[in-house]
Image: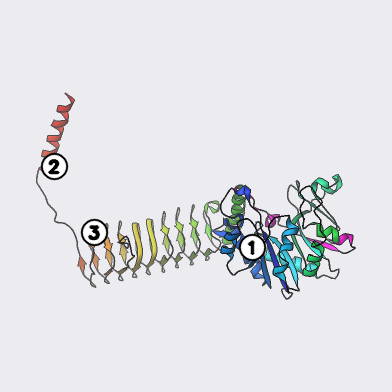
Amino acid sequence: MNTNREFAAVILAAGKGTRMKSDLHKVLHPIAGRPMLDHLLATVDSLKPAKKVVVVGAGRSQLEEALGERAETCLQEPQLGTGHAVQMAEEGLAGHGGDVLVLYGDVPFVKGETMQAMLDRLHADDKPKVVVLGFEPEDPGHYGRVIADADGRIAKMVEYKDASEEERACRLCNSGVMAARGADMFDLLRRVGNDNAQGEYYLVDIVNIANADGDTCAVIATDTPEEVTGINSRAELAAAEAQWQELKRVEAMAGGVTLKAPETVFFSWDTEVANDVTVEPHVVFGPGVTIARGAVIRAFSHLEGATVGEDCSVGPYARLRPGAVMEKDAKVGNFVEMKKATLGEGAKASHLTYLGDAEVGAGANIGAGTITCNYDGYFKYKTVIGERAFIGSNSALIAPVRIGADAIVAAGSAVSRDVGDGDLRMVRGDQVVKPGWADRFHDTMKKKKAAEKK
């Protein structure tokens, strides 16, 4: 791809998004754990733009806070159409002499290759004034049509309601994504009128104005219509999530990952899974997960902010929370939860355990029902368990506490003081035996119950 020419991206995100019925701005709704706007910005950033301007309106403060220093913003108020929105970006692009690519915050999946193809087409030998991104959906429906010749030169842009039957038969539709040289873009926009039913200034009109001047405009058609899918409702958001997940699953399997039931596995935007990893059904990866080669993630496990080493085994029904680290050959089994904890090489916590703010040495064994008691209601404290230590079932390790290497904590112990290397710590109440007491109790209670029935 040719990225030598300077370009700026203008991203339209001023709409109210009323169909989402949400207090959260539409373009901040997540897909695979990442705001849809951030998906688009990441693609734009891969092409190294000279400037990025996001046009805001409704929900302005939310967008400005979310964007921080990553892009400039400009306000469109009142909102008088897409052409008017792009005009609002002119001041933010002062001094920019390159191209302008117009994108939409609620159309997050436009590929970098597609964006670059549009910019390249802008500088082809016929030097079109405007380049439009077209697509051919299965059902063109009421989309505006792009009437173009075999070389992609546009003869006419026409809205469905204004199109003839012959024009409606054309399957090439307008996505709204456009590119032009900056000076041309804003010169044409100044000539756009609002003599239409909505009284708005439409970006698409710059094509027909340029054509009327005798200039060339061109269309680039994507062969994957899904990349220009707009998201305006919860149902469309769910469809976009499904679309993204399906692509990620295919990518993972192509990279050597075994997915036992692909349709039940959900990835985050940044999930990293190495080859020869096996993922069983109904596994969810939240943000920040890395899985090394040979690991097995068993059914119904949830991982977020976790690092899983080579040949590890997770689950079934395990939960790894942020800061969980499993080193090579470590194992967590069913109903084990880890948070800000490291399980050393070959260490095991096979069932019914909570490891929070803990460091577990290599080869240690954590018995069923063990809990690291890390919180006193105000502060968190750390538990350190040495190499090859054995923690008996149903033990409570009351942090801060250190269990030495090769030490044993007897089952049912509540440990609040450090245990030395190789020591045994048993913390239990005295066991009391009263011979015959249970028999006498049962006899008394049975007689009492029988008397109540009379």
Dot placed on the residue nearer the N-terminal end, 1 or 2: 1
The kind of residue tagged 1 is Leu
Q: Which mark is residue 293?
A: none
Give percent across and percent down for residue 275.
53, 65
Q: Which residue position holds label 1?
A: 40
Residue 225 is a magenta residue: yes
Q: Is residue 371 left or right of residue 273?
A: left
In this picture, which residue range is highlighted in magenta?
A: 210-234
Vertical side of 18 occupied by 345: above or below: below
Q: Which residue position holds label 2?
A: 438
Mark nearest the camera among 1 and 2 is: 1
Q: Is residue 312 left or right of residue 149?
A: left
Q: Out of 351 and 260, give the one closest to the viewer.
A: 351
Vertical side of 326 occupied by 229: above or below: above
* Pointers 1 and 2 in contact (C-beta within 8 Å): no
Q: CA distance from mark 2 to mark 3?
A: 25 Å
Q: Residues within 10 Å of mark 2 (few under 14, many from 20)?
A: few
Dot placed on the residue nearer the N-terminal end, 2 or 3: 3
Q: Residues within 10 Å of mark 1 (few under 14, many from 20)?
A: many
Q: Which mark is residue 411?
A: 3
